[in-house]
C-alpha cells in the first residue's frame, strides 16, 4: 500500500478509535517512521461509537431479593452472572448479567441477613446454614469475614442488632422486607 494511503488510514483511525492520550501521542510520533507498525497497533482498538460493554466488578450483588454472583470469564474476559436459587444452587443464564441494574451495589449486611433469614442459606456461598453461629447470623462466618470484615464476635453482635430491629418494625421501616402483612393487614415478623 502506498505510504500516503497508510497515513490517511492512520489519520482516520486517530479520529474514530478509542485510545488513551499516550497511545495517541505514540501513534502520531511513529506515523511517518513506521506507518505499517502504527496501523497494526491501532486497527484492533475499539471504535469510539462501539456499544459499551457493561463492566461489573466480580462479586456478590443483591437486586430486590435476588442474589447474583458476577464472575469474569477466563476465556472471553467478559463478566457473567449466576443467580442463587433458593435451594442454594447457582444457576447460569447469559441474560442474568442484564438483570443487574447499572450502579448496583454489593449487598449490605442487612440484605444478606434478610436473605439468609428467608431461605436458610448463606447468600454469599449458597451453603445451608447449619452450625449454630451461622443459623444465628444468617450468613456463614467465613463469608461474613470475606464480605464485611467481621470477626465471629462482631458478626454475632450485628446479628443481635438485626433481631432487635426485627422486633421494632415501625421504627425501622427500611427493614420492612423482613416483615409480612397478614390477611388482616397487620405486620407479622418473619421470626414468628
Ligand atoms: Zn457462606
Image (cartoon, rainbow, N blue to C red):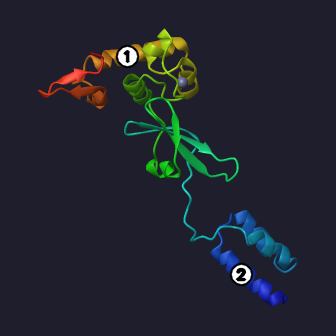
Left or right of 156 on screen, residue 25: right
Disc 2 packing (10 Å; few <14; some 14–19; many ≥20):
some
Residue wearing tag 2: 11
Q: Within 8 Å of ligand 1, the CB of disc 2? A: no
**Which mark is on residue 161?**
1
In the figure, is residue 182 to the left or right of 115? left
For this view, does 2 lie left or right of residue 84?
right
Residue in the image at 17% along x and 26% along y: 182
Residue 128 percent location from the top left of the image: 49, 21
Residue 149 shows up from this direction? no
The foreground one among 9 and 121 is 121
In the rendered image, the vertical position of residue 38 relative to residue 4, given as above or below:
above
The residue at 46%/24% (across/down) is 121
Front tag of 2 and 1 = 1
Q: Indicate the quadrant containing the C terminus: top left, top right, bottom left or bottom right.
A: top left
35 in relation to 168, above or below: below
Q: Is residue 80 visible in the rendered structure shown here?
A: yes
Amino acid at each position: 500500500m502506498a505510504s500516503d494511503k497508510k497515513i490517511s488510514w492512520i489519520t482516520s483511525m486517530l479520529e474514530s478509535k478509542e485510545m488513551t492520550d499516550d497511545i495517541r501521542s505514540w501513534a502520531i510520533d511513529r506515523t511517518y517512521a513506521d506507518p505499517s507498525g502504527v496501523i497494526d497497533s491501532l486497527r484492533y482498538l475499539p471504535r469510539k461509537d462501539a456499544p459499551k460493554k457493561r463492566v461489573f466488578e466480580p462479586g456478590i450483588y443483591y437486586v430486590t431479593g435476588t442474589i447474583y454472583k458476577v464472575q469474569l470469564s477466563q476465556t472471553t474476559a467478559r463478566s457473567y452472572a449466576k443467580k442463587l436459587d433458593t435451594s442454594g444452587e447457582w444457576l447460569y443464564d447469559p441474560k442474568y448479567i442484564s438483570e443487574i441494574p447499572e450502579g448496583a451495589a454489593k449487598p449490605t449486611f442487612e440484605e444478606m441477613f434478610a436473605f439468609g433469614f428467608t431461605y436458610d442459606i448463606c447468600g454469599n456461598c449458597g451453603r445451608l446454614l447449619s452450625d449454630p453461629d451461622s443459623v444465628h447470623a444468617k450468613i456463614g462466618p467465613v463469608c461474613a469475614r470475606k464480605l464485611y470484615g467481621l470477626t465471629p464476635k462482631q458478626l454475632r453482635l450485628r446479628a443481635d442488632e438485626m433481631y432487635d430491629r426485627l422486633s421494632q418494625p415501625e421504627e425501622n421501616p427500611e427493614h420492612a422486607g423482613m416483615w409480612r402483612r397478614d390477611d388482616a393487614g397487620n405486620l407479622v415478623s418473619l421470626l414468628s
